[in-house]
Image (cartoon, helix red, strand yellow):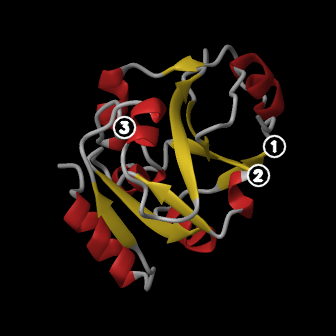
């Protein structure tokens, strides 16, 4: 059974991670997210669940305005033919629906199957904002606490420089 937002908040509390959550209408795209009230300071994210030809899975986490070129990205990370992971694979692996992809979903990847890619420009932000496993809320944590959370889920991560807009 995938973790709920309440499970996530309990985990953040257990780790001593300060977090703040804003409730809003459900959003499924970056464009929709930009249209809702933004009461939380810091970088807002775009999160892509990717798969390569060999079956490796990736979670790319970057700022919402970052252009992502999958051909360039695959060269940077040594992947083979990156494409978007199917919704069923996303649900089975990270326990979230399309539109709710978030680094917080790593809480559901107990075997640490997914490789985590963090945009270097995003990691320069003091605060970062992500869906807390559901797309009708946005939760803010510090960039340092995002790293602590990812590591607490048993994942390593790679900082990847992506092109600025």
Q: Which residue is mark 3?
A: 93
Q: Are marks 2 and 1 in contact (CB under 8 Å)?
A: yes
Q: Nearer the viewer, mark 2 or mark 3?
A: 2
Q: Residue at x 68, y 36 (%)?
A: 66
Dot 3: element: helix
Q: Is residue 96 left or right of residue 115?
A: left
**Image position of 102 with respect to 147: above or below:** above
User: Of label 2 and label 3, which has the lower sequence position?
Assistant: 3
Dot 2: element: loop
Q: Quadrant of residue 97?
A: top left
What is the spatial separation of the Cα atoms under label 2 and label 1, in whole angstroms?
Answer: 5 Å
In this rendered view, identify the residue nearer to me: 15 or 55: 15
Residue 75, percent from left and from top: 82, 24
In this rendered view, identify the residue nearer to me: 163 or 37: 37
- Circle 1 packing at 10 Å, graded few (<14), some (14-19), many (20+), is some
Q: Which residue is mark 2?
A: 120
Q: Which residue is mark 1?
A: 161
What is the spatial separation of the Cα atoms under label 3 and label 1, in whole angstroms?
Answer: 26 Å
**Image position of 155 with respect to 13: above or below:** above
**Image position of 128 with respect to 17: above or below:** above
What is the spatial separation of the Cα atoms under label 2 and label 3, in whole angstroms?
Answer: 25 Å
Residue 3, percent from left and from top: 24, 56
Q: Residue at x 21, y 57 (%)?
A: 4
Report the number of numbered marks.
3
- Circle 2 packing at 10 Å, graded few (<14), some (14-19), many (20+), is some
């Amino acid at each position: 059974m995938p973790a709920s937002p309440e499970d996530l908040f309990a985990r953040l509390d257990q780790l001593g991670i300060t977090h703040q959550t804003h409730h809003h209408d459900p959003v499924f795209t970056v464009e929709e997210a930009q249209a809702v009230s933004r009461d939380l300071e810091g970088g807002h994210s775009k999160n892509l669940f990717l798969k390569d030809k060999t079956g490796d899975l990736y979670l790319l986490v970057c700022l919402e305005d970052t252009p992502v070129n999958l051909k360039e990205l695959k060269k940077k990370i040594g992947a083979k033919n990156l494409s978007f992971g199917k919704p069923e694979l996303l649900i089975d692996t990270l326990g979230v629906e399309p539109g709710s992809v978030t680094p917080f979903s790593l809480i559901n990847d107990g075997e640490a199957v997914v490789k985590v890619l963090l945009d270097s420009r995003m990691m320069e932000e003091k605060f970062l904002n992500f869906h807390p496993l559901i797309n009708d809320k946005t939760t803010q944590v510090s960039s340092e606490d995002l790293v602590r959370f990812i590591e607490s889920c048993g994942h390593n991560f790679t900082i990847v420089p992506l092109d600025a807009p």
